[in-house]
Image (spheres, rainbow, N blue to C red):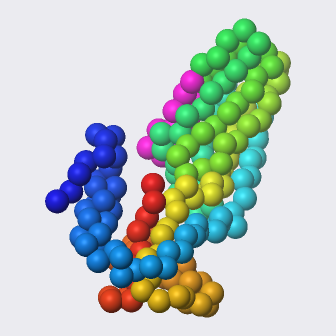
Amino acid sequence: MCKLISLYKSISCLFIFCSLNTHAQKQSDYKYIYKFQLPETNDTAKIVIDTTENQEHLVTLKGKITNNKSEPLSFLTISIKSKDSTFYLTTNNEGFFETSIKPSLYELIINGVGYKSFKISVNANGESNFNFKLILSKSKPLEWFDIYSKKELSQQEIEEIKKCVQSNNQNVSKCRKKNLYYILIEI
């Protein structure tokens, strides 16, 4: 029987808790517990800013945000702060954003789930418009993986399990060895 921990947990969390309960009956057989996180990916944030001459009193900030595979990142939050005000934008389905602002010094902070925050200062002095092309880098995963094993595992076996979890997009059921060990995601 599954217990719902809280209403905001996703369906995948519910599946994990159900799996835990099915294994709980024999959990005492699994006396070795190993914890690990997947390593950070080796991608890097990058930004290109093109400026064009401004003929108006407002400055245009626009751009496109992608990941390191050139896939657009939608629904990222962009906070635009000046000494007088702060306002927020989100990227659309294609990773684009656009707004017009008064000339001032601004700090742009871009945040998205699973990506490192990106911060840049922009001197919107009224002479130029800005077109950003930004590649965000992934953040370190928050999940911990627990391996419940009946026998002591070697470091090599643990590394093989980590590789399996990473190569199967964290689908832990594909990396389990029946009657030897199973893996759970800690959220």
The answer to whether residue 54 shows anywhere in this view is no
Q: What's the residue at 77%, 35% (across, down)? A: 120
Q: In the image, 88: left or right of 148? A: right
Q: Residue 121 location in percent, x, y?
A: 80, 30
In magenta segment, residue 93: yes
Instruction: Give the residue at x 17% y 59%.
Output: 1
Query: Between 127 and 33, which is closer to the camera in this rendering?
Result: 33
> Dividing the picture into quarters, in which one does residue 126 lie?
top right
Residue closer to the observer: 97 or 78: 78
Q: Residue at x 34, y 55 (%)?
A: 13
Asked if residue 63 is positioned above or below residue 36 in the image, the reply reads above
The number of callouts visible is 0
Q: Nearer the viewer, residue 47 or 181?
A: 181
Please provide percent x and percent y for residue 31: 44, 79
Front residue (pair 177, 58): 177
**Direction from residue 7 to residue 111 in the image, left or right:** right
Q: Is residue 44 magenta?
A: no
Instruction: Answer left or right for 109 relative to 19.
Output: right
Looking at the picture, how far across and down is residue 147, in whole percent? 47, 76
Q: Residue furthest left?
A: 1
Q: Is residue 127 left or right of residue 112?
A: right
Q: Can residue 125 be seen in this snapshot?
A: yes
The residue at 70%/42% (across/down) is: 118
Expressed as whole percent of the image width and height from the top left, the position of residue 180 reads 39, 89
* Highlighted range, magenta: 88-98
Q: Is residue 166 depicted above or below 40 in this figure?
A: below
Q: Quadrant of the C terminus?
A: bottom left
